[in-house]
Image: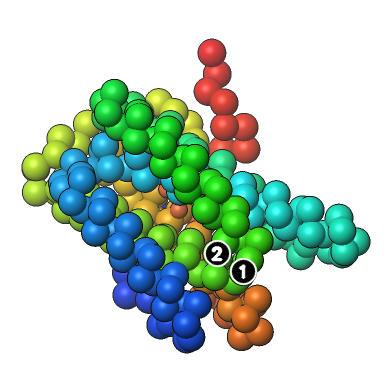
Amino acid sequence: MPTAPFVDLSVHCKPRGPSDRIALTFTKILRFTADTFFAKRYGHRAIVLETVAAVPGMVGATLTHLRCLRRMCDDKGWIRTLMEEAENERMHLMTFIEVAKPTMFERLIILAVQWVFYLAFFTLYLLSAKTAHRVVGYFEEEAVISYTLYLAELDEGRSPNGPAPAIARHYWKLGDDATLRDVVLLVRADEAHHRDINHGFANELAGLAVNHAAVAPYPDHADDIRLAA
Ligand SMILES: [Fe+2]
Ligand SMILES: [Fe+2]
């Protein structure tokens, strides 16, 4: 059974200018809001936040695709990377929907937040793709922290560590005896990878050096994400 790749929990991109500081402040405000609303209900927290996390990749892919068409230039592999990120986040959502069921109120929040966040992120990406990728990098830093706290809840018995949902066993190529803890470790590794990729994109757009070797390894995922009927 695959084990989760190593995740460096100490990674933090220090803000290097006003746009980075805006991105970090915006992320901290959202973190405070999520902490206030969900407290330690990590399953519910994951469901709502993954519906948000799945938006930026698709927005970035769409706008990069359109820019490459207009400028008739190569995308350097960004479009597929961003589309894959969106799909990966949607698989996180489909996994956690099997762990916790969203309440009607949470579904309404998701509807409202999707409209606001999609339009806001789309506008931000048009204005400054660099800031948009920095925002995602900081979101992902917070996601790594949140899933680390979720692991502590599981390890200390405050949340039940049940069997891994079938969709997760298929997607991360896990054995039949895999547990929720195994899945959370892999989700956290996915988030660490997105963190480093998006900070790297922001650095590249800012004209800074990009250390590709420092990107957190990505867990292996199923090529065909559909579960056999
Ligand atoms: Fe995620
Ligand atoms: Fe993520």
Q: Residue at x 37, y 45 (%)?
A: 49
Q: Residue at x 61, y 85 (%)?
A: 208
Q: Measured along the vertical axis of the image, is residue 208 above or below residue 105?
A: below
Identify whether 158 is placed above or below 140: above
How far is disc 2 from disc 1 in space, using C-alphas? Answer: 6 Å
**Which amino acid does the dot numbered 1 rest on?**
Ser
User: 51 or 94, which lies in front?
Assistant: 51
Q: Nearer the viewer, residue 36 or 184?
A: 36
The residue tagged 2 is: 132
Residue 96 makes an appearance in the image: no
Q: Residue furthest right?
A: 72
Image point (55%, 64%), residue name: 132
Give x and y (percent) for residue 203.
Answer: 58, 78
25 left or right of 125 in image: left
Residue 220 in the figure: left or right of residue 34: right
Let me know if residue 153 appears in the view: yes
Q: Which residue is mark 1?
A: 128
The residue drawn where x is 20% and y is 44% is 38
Residue 180 place in picture, x, y as percent? 28, 38
| Label 1: which secondary element | loop
